[in-house]
Amino acid sequence: MRDLSKPDHLPNLREGGQPPEPSWLPRQRRGITPQMIGRYPDYDVFDTAETWDPATARVIAERMEVRGSFAFFTPDEQPTLRALCDVAVAQDAEPRIPVPELIDEKLAAGRLDGYQYADMPDDRETWRLTLAGLDEVTAERHDGYRFAGLDSRSQEAVVENFSKAQLRSASFDRLNITRTWSVCMRMILAAFYSHPWAWNEIGFGGPAYPRGFMRLGPTSTREPFERPGATDEDPVRTVTEGRA
Amino acid sequence: MIRHLLKGAVGPKDNDSRYLLDVHRRDLPGEATMRAYPDNEEVDLCVVGAGAGGSVLAQRLARRGWKVVILEAGPFWHPDEDWVSDEAGSHQLYWTEKRIIGGNDPVELGKNNSGRGVGGSMVHYAGYCPRFHPSDLQTDTLDGVGADWPISYQQLRPHYERVEAELPVAGQNWPWGYPHTYPFSPHPVSEAASVLWRGAIAQGITMRVGPVGIVNGTFGNRPHCIYRGYCLQGCKVNAKASPYVTHLPDALAHSVEIRANCMAARVELDPSSRRATGVTFIKEGEQIERLQRAKVVAVAGYSIETPRLLLNSATKGFPNGLCNNEDQVGRYVMVQGATQAAGRFPTELRMYKAPPAQVSSEDFYETNPSRGFARGFSIQTVSPEPIGWAEHVLADGHWGRALREYMRDYNHWTTIGVLNELLAEPDNRVTLAEEKDPFGLPVARFDYSLCDNDKANVAFSTEVITDILHAAGAQDVLTIQRFAHLIGGARMGTSPENSVVDAHQRSWAVPNLYLADGSVCPTQGSANPALTIMALSSLLAEHLGSRPATERSRL
Ligand SMILES: Cc1cc2nc3c(=O)[nH]c(=O)nc-3n(C[C@H](O)[C@H](O)[C@H](O)COP(=O)(O)OP(=O)(O)OC[C@H]3O[C@@H](n4cnc5c(N)ncnc54)[C@H](O)[C@@H]3O)c2cc1C
Ligand code: SF4
């Protein structure tokens, strides 16, 4: 295992700009993380849930319940949406944070961000055109396929082009594709990182009212309930010997 | 000197807000017993917008016996129930009605710069409360860019001091601009910010703790900060200053009525005298127009909504929008460049602890000809929460597995930002769009483009903070280019040809119409604007309040 004080796992410092395979990460031992990988295998933000104020606890409980149903995206659009969301944040296995459902809920409720680029339609329209566009691009490249039907490699290749504003199709041509990428990605990221499972993965302390944070450093930046990042420990030994 | 010695011990006179607040509940005390004026009663003052500028004006004049109604488009907050310790759950704090953004460098609005609701944008501002420098009020004379203000720093200074005591502002003695001290001692600094500070020291850059409008110790019934870091999501503790805790409690105790969920649609004019008669508004859910009559009208809806309201108030005498016969309304809207650079360090820093606003520098604030551009920038520590951090990583070009990797590394990162003074340009402008809001009112369109001076400033400052990170020992650096803050849009000046309001913030065109918010500032310096907006309102209140009550209908 790697020494976490070193930055050699960071994409900018590696050839090809990609991180190591997630297999170097410990499996989650407490709580849930997306795909059960993370850097804080013994940390579960829900361990502190009894310290959250009721308003915050309610909002998070409601978020945890979003699952399964769609009000904005049509059944035809849903597979494309799901495939895009999976690739965009590399959710390639269960458990998955329900990103498509969280986005659907936001768009159905009309909770938009308060601005629309002059050369772009409404965000809701942008989403519909994007999903149509991904299928159009796919149909052209892989005869008869839709985006959701591609293997993950090919999907990633399309998304890579999307991120570099290199897609053309009838629907994409009605959009400014650079801005489209940012509109879609920011909504995907806001959904993913609003979810407590993602907080477990990254070791974020979560809601902190009325408790607050005491350990600002320099002696320690870790509250008693927070856990250190994964170290060289052998997880099997840790579990069998009961060292948390 | 006394201010210096008695840190934290001297409270403001003429503002009891800190004692009126309840220790056990966060609600604005006095809501249940709030005065309710009938629409047809001609009050002394109708303010549009319960934000930084509008609230200070209302509080001050209410103390002088004025009858005041504030119309506020957003809700009357009940922080215990409405505000959450959660990024995504704070969406309702922002102005999220549609606005159209254009130009070469469109400015994203919403959570980035616009609040909605009682307390305005300061409910979710970061809390930095620096003053402008004296030079900011004379950029034309000194540097040949921007504009000179029709008022002087010395006029503003007593109001800076007063507002600093009311917020109260905590920080080290301030060596920059017009040197001054702060009423409260500096807060402790987190390790995440200290790392950056050490990098600055290595680069020969001076940084100081603060200035932040966050209680250090206690202040009346307002408690000490609990360092939970959710300042941008609304302070549920009452430690961070916003008009909701600093001015509106006292305003309510002096018979101000805040009419929440009421969207001002038009300022009404008497066609013969060209005086404002009041404000037409629509209460959410009612869909009927009502008119609040008033002797004096003050618009304080901030840089996008104030011009929009004026433009939407066109009449026969003002076919292109109220006060806009000289084509000045909506022009010279400014934002600040707000590039942020994050650095990776070997140990866990957990930057989400403590307020994002901690340590800052104004070493680069003034023009230095050797840099090749006019004016300058300030440097401030910031600290994005996970969604903000994800946007930062995305902006550096990462998605998928690479993005997840950077996100998992969150706790090893710390972030430093700049505020560039971007220059006022006439074509950076608010106009009306084709689209309408749910009330049927045309929404605002905001066009923005950078000039060469702006681009040079942004590029230079990005290098400075990147160097700070490297000097601190950063192992990797990620950068995001962005904008922050709004100012201008209906600026004050010396004549109707170059401005919308005069030195007293009174519109040139309508004698009893005042603007009392950030839209009146002709330049913005590299300082965060809230303190200055409040100080300007305080100055305006002094001017209006010194007139005898009998003169109000003739103001
Ligand atoms: C994320 C963020 C961080 C910030 N950080 C800082 C910081 O650290 N330091 C700093 O100094 N500043 C900061 N700011 C900026 C600061 O909050 C604003 O500059 C300041 O609050 C503006 O004051 P104002 O009175 O002009 O407008 P606001 O405080 O925005 O008040 C305007 C009010 O008018 C209401 N309104 C508008 N139109 C209408 C209408 N037609 N009818 C009725 N009501 C209407 C709005 O709902 C709003 O409540 C930040 C802002 C944001 C969003
Ligand atoms: S860090 Fe302090 S000021 Fe900021 S929200 Fe928390 S308690 Fe309030």
Image (spheres, rainbow, N blue to C red):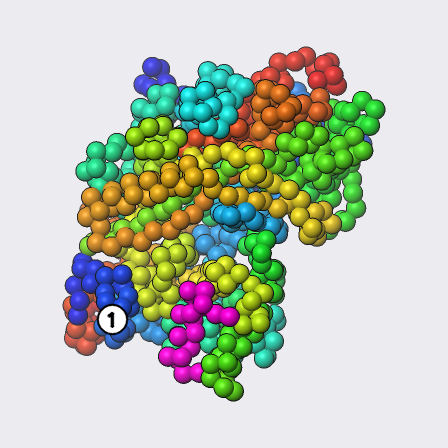
Indicate the quadrant containing the C terminus of chain B: top left, top right, bottom left or bottom right.
Answer: top right
Q: For the N terminus of chain B, give its image quadrant.
A: top left
Q: Residue at x 59, y 53 (%)?
A: A118
* Whether residue B456 can be seen here: yes
Which of the 4 quarters of the picture holds residue B348?
Answer: bottom left
Percent x, y of residue A182: 47, 60
Q: Is residue A31 above or below residue B122?
A: below
Q: Which residue in the rendered view is the most extreme toward the bottom?
A: A144
Q: Residue at x 31, y 24 (%)?
A: B175
Label 1 is placed on what type of residue? Pro
Q: Which residue is mark 1?
A: A20
Image position of B138 (left or right of B328):
left
Residue for point 56% across, 35% down: B426
A204 or A157, which lies in front?
Answer: A157
Q: Is residue B207 magenta?
A: no
Q: Residue at x 45, y 54 (%)?
A: B86
Q: Can residue B210 be seen?
A: no
**Which stretch appears magenta?**
A150-168
Pointer 1: residues within 10 angstroms few (<14), some, or many (20+)?
A: some
Q: Image check: B90 left or right of B364? A: right
Q: Using the image, determine if residue B477 lies above or below residue B364.
A: below
Magenta residues: mostly which secondary structure? helix
B444, A26: nearer the viewer: B444
